[in-house]
Amino acid sequence: MKKCSMRSKRSMLNAQRSTSKSCLLFVERSALSVGRWAFVYLLLLAVAGPIQAAPLPDKDTPLDWVYPAAQPLRVHVVRGLWSREYRLEEALALTGAGFVTESWHSQGMGFGYVGGWDPNSGGGVPEFPDTAEDLLANHVLVVCNINAKAFTPSQQKLLQGFVQNGGGLLFLGGRFAFGSQWTNTPLAEIAPVDFVKQGFDLTNDVQGLPLTAGPDRLGNDPAPLRWAQAPRVFWYHDVKPKAGAQIAVVAGGHPLLIAGTYGKGRVAVFAGSVMGAPPAGALPLWQWDDWPRLMARTVTWLAAPRDHLNGTLSPAIRQDLTTALASLDSLTEDTKSQAALAAVEPLMVRAAKLCRDGDALLPILSALAAGATDPAPLLSDLLGRRAAETLGARGNPLAAKLLASGKPGKVAIGLRLAGAGRAPGAADTLVRALVSGEVEKTAIGGTSDGESLLAEPILAAPGGQKEAAAALIRLAALEGLAALGDPKTCPAIRTSIAANQPNGHFDKIVGDRGVEAYTIKTDTRLYQTGLLAALACGDATVAGPLADALLGNVYVASRARSGYGTPKASPATKLEGALPYILAWQVQMHAMLRSCPVERLAPLARELAALDDIRIVPSACAAFGGRLLTPDIKAALKTSKVKGVAALGETPL
């Protein structure tokens, strides 16, 4: 066996087969610092053999601690019992949050157990972000009335690392929070308070203790809070602030809102609860006019360290990717290069989830464009969307190469880039791709000026693999058209909307409209993306159906969460009826909403304000949170009966 060596911290082992025709290179990187983890990349350099990529870090260990760029604010809420009473929707709207996601506590909270909770039962949070990279899509986490064992040991360590490396975390009290169950856990270590060593820690004051300002103030909101209204807490936790903690709110001498730092991040604990039966004349804190503003101040303070964030990959990760992709250029046979790409795709997917920096994405896309490989749909969608967000016109040369490749995954990336970069001839290119769904008809420009294809019928795609490829291309074309925003393309987009109208039934009546309850299938995604594209191109008539679709997605997720009437996963994909797939689609819809020019969103503001359902708030935040709104949009939002939507019409903190 022939031995090879490399300088510094890398080593290489060449294993020669009996035929002497194949050689596998293992590139091993040692841990460089706290938070960096060792992992091995397997690259195929010669003839294809069995691909057995060495494992990446486990899913609860990030490649690196990379947080999104500072704006917009991104918050994930872990909801337990009575979480709606905390009025977080209003609070997050006041912060100007642009992305709000949530997960829910499952069964097993130990209700009725002597002492208030069962130390051997924790339930779980099955919707908690599936990987560390998914969690790192957020700046602040809010954990509302959750017992410690709902989180696995690895999830608790992940939460600890999230704060230690720069994230913000707010713990809210309640029936299942805190107490001795939190003692000796990573959650207790990062909290700015000490919890009781034994037993249940909730204390009841029947008359309620009035809240007053503590010695410390969180945030820079100049508006005074109306403490004279005497909001009261009826059940509170027995906690002791740690040395150096800030006490922002007290009740009857008991610290109630306590904050502190941990590593590079910040943590706050609200040691009260939204429990109790207020006596006549007493104002419970959850009905206090300024309660959402107090929570908004707290979240804004927790998020403050994000000012330095830019969503870029560290130099070490970028070097890992460069090394992993370097051999792909030299492989010309599709089977060999595709096998090599398959070995490094898990690394690329996780890196793409973290990266929101065009400079870091350019080398990855350049390597893909130069090689004979075609990324899988998941990687294609991730890279295409990230690149469209960050590259602008810089992506146009790459778009031309990717579109000329004739490979579906590359073409899908190229279509998104062409729209975002407003490449010459992009409208014609995108419309041709939308109409045909074929890769060979997607070269940029052409003899047509786009007019001849605008109203052509959407061609039916053949079944099987070609059908999947056609859907991939059409979805990317619609996203590219949304980024392009050309009103001239509206007829073609309307044709696509009509061709993909989902079949469903009316599950809940909203005003004079119904909300369809259907699973998230391919035609659903094409239909909803078409609605967004049409709105981005100036078609106000789609605002009503789009608002219904956004709320419809919430109902689909609720059904999947509860198990009632849940559609089964597609036999082909195993995904379409699954809750993670549905939630991921909601996130994508919100990302597309966020990229839509705000001046095109006035019709949607009126439609969202007409929906009397608190669960529409995350969609409204995606469209309007923290953005410079026109007077007509502000006025429309303020008419909403949903306070979280109406709050978006106010100036954020």
Image (tube, helix red, strand yellow):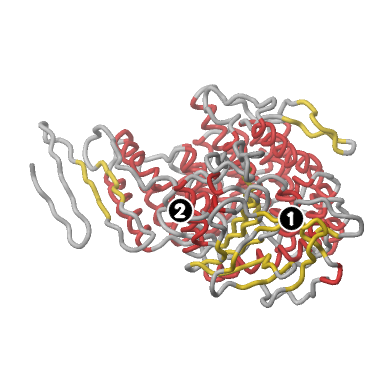
- Please report the residue visible at 55 percent of the width from the left and 75 percent of the height from the top: 244
Residue 419 shows in this picture: yes
Q: Is residue 431 something that shows in the picture?
A: no
Q: Which mark is residue 387?
A: none
Q: Relative to residue 143, is residue 312 depicted above or below? A: below
Which residue type does callout 1 highlight? Asn
Instruction: Tell which tag, 2 or 1, sits nearer the viewer.
Output: 1
Q: Give the position of the C terminus as an image quadrant.
A: bottom right
Instruction: Indicate which disc residue 157 carries.
Output: 2
Does residue 322 appear to the left or right of 404 in the view shown? left
- How far apart are labels 2 and 1 at the CA level? 32 Å
Would residue 36 be found to the left or right of residue 553 on screen? left
Residue 437's place in the image compared with 615, above or below, is: above
The residue depicted at 12 percent of the width and 51 percent of the height is 4
Q: In the rendering, at what x and y percent does residue 294 appear?
A: 74, 66
Q: Quadrant of residue 47?
A: top left
- Nearest the viewer among 424 and 248 is 248
Of the numbered discs 2 and 1, the one sitting upstream in the chain is 2
Secondary element under disc 2, as helix, strand or loop, is helix
Give whichever of 248, 427 is nearer the camera. 248
Q: Quadrant of the N terminus?
A: top left
Residue 296 x %, y %: 71, 64
Which residue carries the number 1 mark?
Answer: 204
- Measuring from the top left, give residue 44's x and y in whole percent: 26, 41
Q: At numbered mark 1, what does the secondary structure look like: helix, strand or loop?
A: strand
For the view shown, which residue lies furthest in the right direction? 281
Residue 271 x %, y %: 66, 60
Horizontal side, residue 451 vs residue 276: left or right: left
